[in-house]
Amino acid sequence: MTWLVVIGGLVLLVFLHELGHFSVALAVGMRPRSFYIGFPPALAKVRHRGIEYGIGLIPLGGLVRIPGMHRPAGRDLQAFIEPAIREEPGLAAPVGAVRRALESENYAAARRLYPDLEQEVGAAHLSPAARRSADRALREVEEGTAPDAYWRAATWKRVAVIAAGPLANVVIAFLILFIAFAVSGGPSDNPSTKVDSVSSGTPAAAAGLTAGDRIVAVDGRPTPTFAVVSHLIRSSRGGAVTLTVERDGRRVTVGPQPTIFQQGRWIFGFTPAAQLVPYSTGHAASSALSDLGNVVTGTAKGITSLFSKHGRSQVSGPVGIVRVSHAQLKVGATWYFEILAFVSMSLALLNLLPLLPLDGGHILFSLIEGVRRRALAREVYERVSVVGIMLIVLVFVIAFSNDVSGGTPH
């Protein structure tokens, strides 16, 4: 059940991110053509009022297809529809008419000619590959010449639509933390007897201690506070200790295992969770803002540390995020919501990096086009996107490597 909660929370963050793009696009007059959680091909889809809603097979994000992201060009039309022309030479004439209109930037004429081209392509006998390419060509013309095309909109509208996704994640992150702190309280400086995490290669890990366990006794001696737990473990001086813990409503014996000496003290190998104390509304809001500020500085340090071996080892991907979220949910709902908020904030910050195809890259290019008063060609976007995609793939590979080496969750 906890795994479903964890995965459901991450899917919800993606959904709300895409909902931000979707809602603002509708508000400023750019009617999206589709709204997907996950990337196509579709596992399930439905069409409502001209918009296709679906769940994609590839669960790595989401997609809102906003019409006319790029200025339509005759060479793009020719490139996409060329396979169809080779199979049906009769398409050359209607394609040529639309292409000439696009090359002269007479988008109204191209739109008037579009129905004839659509009819000719629809009647043509094409192979599946040529059909897919031709359908893309038609879609690019229809959406690119539409009055609500993204590339034709005012700069502020374009920036608003793209920024809405990351902004939604920022708002969500704040609300999650604020509500969690206001309802359940927030962490204090004093640790509790509950286990937050277990270090690998330690006696705690060997004994089977897990995140979420509450230590009620050490060697049979009750431990009402963490100070007592710490004193008894340090007093072992390398001897074997046995912990009694509460786990899933029952008492479990962990150990015996000898303690080890690290950083000047005898330890078992776990980190305690902080105690929760009541927060006032104002304190909950200020703590939420403070935590989000720490995410900003931490993300900035994380990006710069990618150039060091230690920094790369700290990067987590989807598997690592799910693993940590699951562990924190076992510790307590507040800790899980805190991780979920941090993931939402990190998602916003990473999307705002000025790299295509990330949201920040689209915002940057919208501003550039606003200054030059002319949309850039598709190939400019595609060439610049290569650099961004390479960097994204590099980070993903590093994160995936760290996730795999992190082992299987308890």
Image (spheres, grey):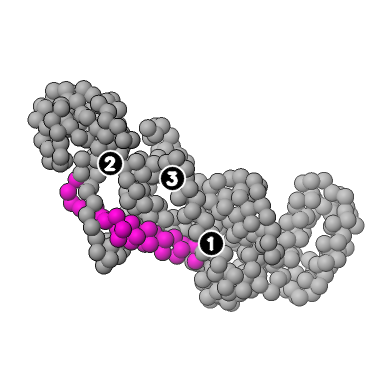
The residue sitting at the right extreme is 90
Q: CA distance from mark 1 to mark 2?
A: 33 Å
Answer with mark 3 or mark 2, whichever residue precedes in sequence: 3
Answer with mark 1 or mark 2, whichever residue precedes in sequence: 1
Q: Is residue 338 above or below residue 322?
A: below
The segment highlighted magenta reads 164-191
- The residue that label 3 is drawn on is 6
Q: Which mark is residue 19?
A: 1
- Front one among 343 and 175: 175
Residue depicted at 11% across the width and 32% down the height: 232
Residue 219: horizontal and vertical position, in percent? 15, 26
Element assignment for label 2? strand
Residue 388: horizontal and vertical position, in percent? 51, 54
Q: Is residue 214 above or below residue 303?
A: above
Element assignment for label 1? helix
Q: CA distance from mark 3 to mark 1?
A: 20 Å
Residue 15: horizontal and vertical position, in percent? 52, 56
- The residue that label 2 is drawn on is 196
Amino acid type, mark 1 = Leu
Q: Is residue 201 visible?
A: no
Amino acid type, mark 2 = Asp
Amino acid type, mark 3 = Val
Residue depicted at 78% across the width and 71% down the height: 110
Residue depicted at 46% across the width and 50% down the height: 10
Q: Classify 10 Å Cα crowding around label 1: few (below 14), some (14-19), many (20 and above).
A: many
Q: Main secondary structure of the magenta part?
A: helix
- Front one among 296 and 34: 34
Q: Classify 10 Å Cα crowding around label 2: few (below 14), some (14-19), many (20 and above).
A: many
